[in-house]
Image (tube, rainbow, N blue to C red):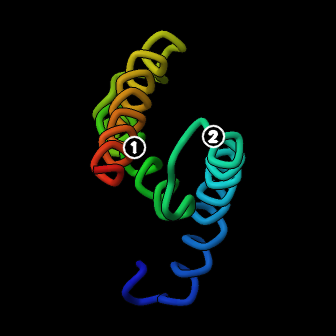
Amino acid sequence: EGHRHHEMAAGFYRAAHGGVVAAVAAHLQRWHEQGLLQLEDPTTDADRFTHILRSGLYERVLLGLHPSRPTQREIEAAVRPAVRTFLRGLACTATAASR
């Protein structure tokens, strides 16, 4: 429907996705200021992270391919490797930037 109702789709994207990205970016920025992470752009990094989270289990649930509501255990099993991948990616970026 986004092609037919562009403004509605854009508004939804800004409010839904944009709100999540802003919240994650605020945490990343705080961790950056505390010296825990090296970031160039917390908003871009937060956007990438939300997309990592939306792969796998999230997509299967969204498309109705998952047989039921995911359990807490399934959610954690999906989120933990996503967080690990994201943080490792930031570490690699920081290492490469310091060379």
Work out which residue is located at the far top of the displayed protein and give it.
73
> Residue 62's spot in the image, x, y percent?
39, 44
Q: Residue at x 31, y 36 (%)?
A: 60
- Mark 1 is on which residue type? Leu
Give the residue at x 59% y 57%: 21
Q: Type of residue at label 2?
A: Gly
Q: Secondary structure at mark 1?
A: helix
User: Dividing the image into 4 quarters, which one contains the N terminus?
Assistant: bottom left
User: Which residue corresponds to mark 2?
Assistant: 35
Judge the density around disc 2: few (<14), some (14-19), many (≥20) Cα neighbours within 10 Å.
few
Label 2 to label 1: alpha-carbon separation = 13 Å
Which residue is at a point 60% across and 36% down the rendered structure image? 36
Q: Is residue 27 left or right of residue 41?
A: right
* Rendering coords of residue 78 (x, y %): 38, 24
Q: Is residue 67 above or below residue 20?
A: above
Question: From what the image shows, is residue 17 above or below residue 84?
Answer: below
The residue that mark 1 highlights is: 90
Residue lying at the far front of the rendered structure: 99
Mark 2 secondary-structure assignment: loop
Quarter where residue 95 is shown: top left
Vertical order, 56 against 32 (above or below): above
Q: Relative to the observer, which residue lies in front, 47 or 96?
A: 96
Q: Earlier in the sequence, mark 2 or mark 1?
A: 2
The image shows residue 83 at horizontal and vertical percentages of: 44, 31
Instruction: Give the image location of residue 84, x and y in percent.
Output: 39, 27
Mark 2 and mark 1 in contact? Answer it, CB < 8 Å: no
Mark 1 Cα within 10 Å, few/some/many (few <14, many 20+)? some
